Image (cartoon, rainbow, N blue to C red):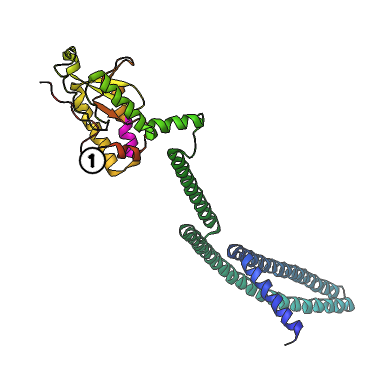
Amino acid sequence: MSIMRRMSDLFQQKANKVLDRAENPVEALDLSYQKQMESLQQVRRSVADVLTSEKRLEIQAAQLQQSQDKLQGQAKLALQQGREDLARLALTRAQDAQNQLQSLQVQIAQMKDQEQKLELTAQKLQAKVEAFRTQRETMKAQYSAAKATTQVGEAVTGLSEHMADVNLMMERAQDKTQQMQARAAAIDSLVDSGTLDQIGITSGDDIERQLQSGLATSEVDAQLAQLKQEVLGAPAEAPKLEAAAPAPPPPPAAAPAAAPSDTTRATVVVRIQGEDQYRLAVSEQPQLEPLDRALSDAISRQDQDSYRTALAALLNFVRAHGTKVPADDLVPSDVVLPSEDMTLEEATALLSEDGNVVDAPASPA
């Protein structure tokens, strides 16, 4: 095969593919119906033209018949006048008219036959056009239904170009959302660990917060033990998260101390590490114990979120229901609670092995 032949075949293949993609079956059916209607109109015009010619021949035949009758009358009149020559001439012309009339009648008969054939053809063509019109509507409906079904199927399965773009956008949105969630979690973790400072908190505040949360616990505990020794005259226990035992009564040899009042005996002193002391009534114990258990359970499970929630609830309850002890009133603390910014690891280290954060004070004798 020559190169030119191959190029011609290749061009025809590409052109045929483009034409097939551009061709619309609905438009093709409408064009075919329009062409058939034009053909039917052409046949009808042809029938009208044949009928027109037939009528013209019939008019000419009528005129020849009249001329023949007139010549016959003239021949009779010429014989009556003794003019045989005129009679012969009139009869000759009448014979010519008769011959023309016969020829016209033959043509008129042929025209009638042609007219009947054209009318029959027009009727058959009209029937075919009507049948094609019905078939055209059926095929258009089938094509529209198939096209709609295909579009719906592509939309449902994601094969259509539009749905593919939508799926890609959804995937990009999910990727960005997961990336932002991971970044937010990383920032929260860095803030909780102290690596990043929040806006408005200086490095000095961060050091003070770390000191309050346990970095200087040993020094504070030593000062507190010395203070209890001076005030109460009895050895003070190291502070821990569980409730401290009630302070023993002073020895008989010591200086007489005022007996605790009923109000003092019916209360418990709670100290929030790094903050003030609060005096809570023993009657608050039923409401305090669920908060205490929730905090202890969170520490036991090492659940950071539950620990923060339970600690905040416990501290808020103490601040709301307790009475703040004046700063110059040196009284021993029955319960020591973690500070609000103490981490879960520090609270775990301070929590006793058995016992809750808050224990009920001993009943007065």
User: Residue 316: horizontal and vertical position, in percent?
Assistant: 32, 26
How many marks are shown on the rendered structure? 1
Mark 1: amino acid: Glu
Write the residue at 44% across / 44% down.
Answer: 185
Write the residue at 48% across / 47% down.
Answer: 177
In the figure, residue 9 lies in which quadrant?
bottom right
Write the residue at 74% across / 83% down.
Answer: 5
Q: Is residue 130 magenta?
A: no
User: Residue 346: horizontal and vertical position, in percent?
Assistant: 34, 38
Quarter of the picture holding the N terminus:
bottom right
Q: Which residue is denoted by mark 1 in the rendering? A: 353
Tag 1 secondary structure:
loop
With 203 as the anchor, is 300 left or right in this view?
left
The answer to whether residue 271 of the structure is visible from this angle is: no
Give the magenta range: 305-312
With 14 as the anchor, is 163 left or right in this view?
left
